[in-house]
């Protein structure tokens, strides 16, 4: 890990006086890596928009199903997980390396608390490799350059962008980030993405006031987008069945989980 990717560097950037997404998300899914301010903001948002806890759990469960599907059914052995969040049970490398011990995983995040927990993410099988990059999604070129030290970018990669492009407020810029990352990986690579929506048909209208409160009281600022806008992140790629749907129902089996206002999809680069 480079000097800028050390826990000491993370400590220097840590601000415990302002709620931060990674820590609040950890609070919503029942974790312990958060501060009082994160709990306060998390409770207020949940009071405004109670389904947020279901969204957090559904997003995490989607990650597990997507990684298992790609590793088992599509033979993917390389994962670039951008916007990792705080480590918890069933992280990407744990799922992938349980299926294929030689899997290679690179995590990317720029939250200092995530950085201080990076050593947890760097444990894996002796046959495989896990690495962590302290980098910002707004700088995809830096991510790709550093990921290329661990991943073979001439071979297929599953690019995981779960709940991360919603922190890129300019839609064209967010689309460009997805396009640039996918342009750097070969045919047979995948884009795995989730994103909050304000679409009424999946119950997203309540996201708007909750996000307004968030943007006034926490960091980083966030935005929801329509399904049509989110679908554009997959331009040039082929969506796998069932397409862009609530992440809670993607490959969820027969238990008919409740729909949440967070879209999810997996697409392959032809």
Image (cartoon, rainbow, N blue to C red):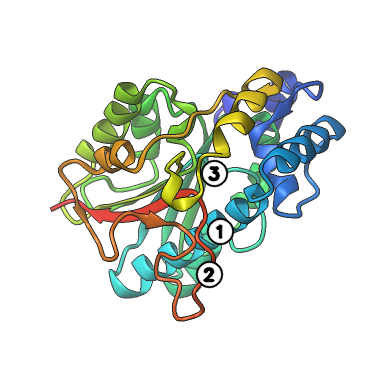
Q: Nearer the viewer, residue 199 or 136?
A: 199
Q: Position of residue 185 (x, y in %)?
A: 23, 44
Q: Report how far apart the C-alphas of labels 1 and 3 lie in the structure.
A: 16 Å
Q: Residues within 10 Å of mark 1 (few under 14, many from 20)?
A: many
Residue that badge 1 annotates: 58
In the rendered structure, are the residues bearing label 1 and label 3 in contact, judged by CB atoms less than 8 Å apart?
A: no
Foreground disc of the pair 3, 2:
2
Q: Is residue 212 left or right of residue 145?
A: right
Residue that badge 2 annotates: 257
Foreground disc of the pair 2, 1:
2
In the rendered structure, are the residues bearing label 3 and label 2 in contact, judged by CB atoms less than 8 Å apart?
A: no
Q: Report how far apart the C-alphas of labels 3 and 2 lie in the structure.
A: 24 Å
Q: Position of residue 102 (x, y in %)?
A: 41, 66
Q: Secondary structure at mark 1?
A: helix
Return the disc, 3 or 2, that comes first in the chain's sequence. 3
Q: Secondary structure at mark 3?
A: loop
Q: Position of residue 28 (x, y in %)?
A: 71, 48
Q: Residues within 10 Å of mark 2 (few under 14, many from 20)?
A: some
Q: Nearer the viewer, residue 125 or 216?
A: 216
Q: How many labels, in total?
A: 3
Foreground disc of the pair 1, 3:
1
Res 1 → quadrant: top right
Q: Residues within 10 Å of mark 3 (few under 14, many from 20)?
A: many
Please give the name of the residue rendered at 44% of the width and 65% of the height, measured from the top-left corner. 249
In the rendered structure, are the residues bearing label 2 and label 1 in contact, judged by CB atoms less than 8 Å apart?
A: yes
- The circle on residue 20 is none
Up/down of 153 relative to 116, above or below:
below
Q: Residue furthest bottom?
A: 254
Q: Report how far apart the C-alphas of labels 2 and 1 lie in the structure.
A: 9 Å
Q: Position of residue 110 (x, y in %)?
A: 57, 29
Residue that badge 3 annotates: 84
């Amino acid at each position: 890990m480079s000097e800028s990717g050390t826990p000491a560097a993370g400590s220097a950037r840590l601000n415990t006086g302002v709620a931060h997404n990674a820590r609040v998300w950890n609070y919503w899914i029942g974790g312990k890596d958060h501060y009082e301010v994160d709990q306060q903001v998390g409770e207020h948002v949940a009071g405004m928009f109670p389904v947020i806890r279901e969204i957090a759990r559904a997003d995490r469960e989607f990650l597990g199903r997507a990684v298992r599907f790609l590793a088992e059914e599509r033979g993917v052995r390389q994962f670039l997980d951008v916007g990792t969040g705080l480590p918890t049970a069933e992280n990407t490398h744990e799922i992938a390396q349980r299926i294929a011990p030689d899997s290679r995983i690179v995590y990317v995040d720029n939250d200092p608390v995530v950085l201080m927990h990076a050593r947890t993410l760097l444990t894996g099988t002796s046959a495989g490799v896990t690495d962590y990059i302290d980098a910002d999604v707004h700088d995809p070129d830096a991510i790709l350059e550093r990921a290329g030290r661990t991943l073979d970018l001439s071979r297929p990669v599953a690019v995981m962008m779960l709940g991360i492009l919603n922190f890129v407020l300019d839609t064209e810029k967010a689309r460009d980030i997805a396009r640039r990352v996918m342009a750097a990986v070969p045919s047979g690579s995948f884009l795995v993405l989730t994103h909050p929506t304000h679409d009424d048909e999946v119950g997203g209208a309540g996201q708007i006031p909750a996000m307004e409160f968030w943007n006034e009281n926490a960091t980083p600022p966030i935005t929801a987008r329509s399904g049509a806008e989110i679908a554009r992140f997959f331009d040039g790629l082929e969506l796998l069945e069932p397409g862009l749907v609530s992440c809670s129902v993607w490959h969820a089996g027969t238990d008919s989980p409740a729909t949440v206002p967070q879209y999810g999809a997996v697409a392959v680069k032809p």
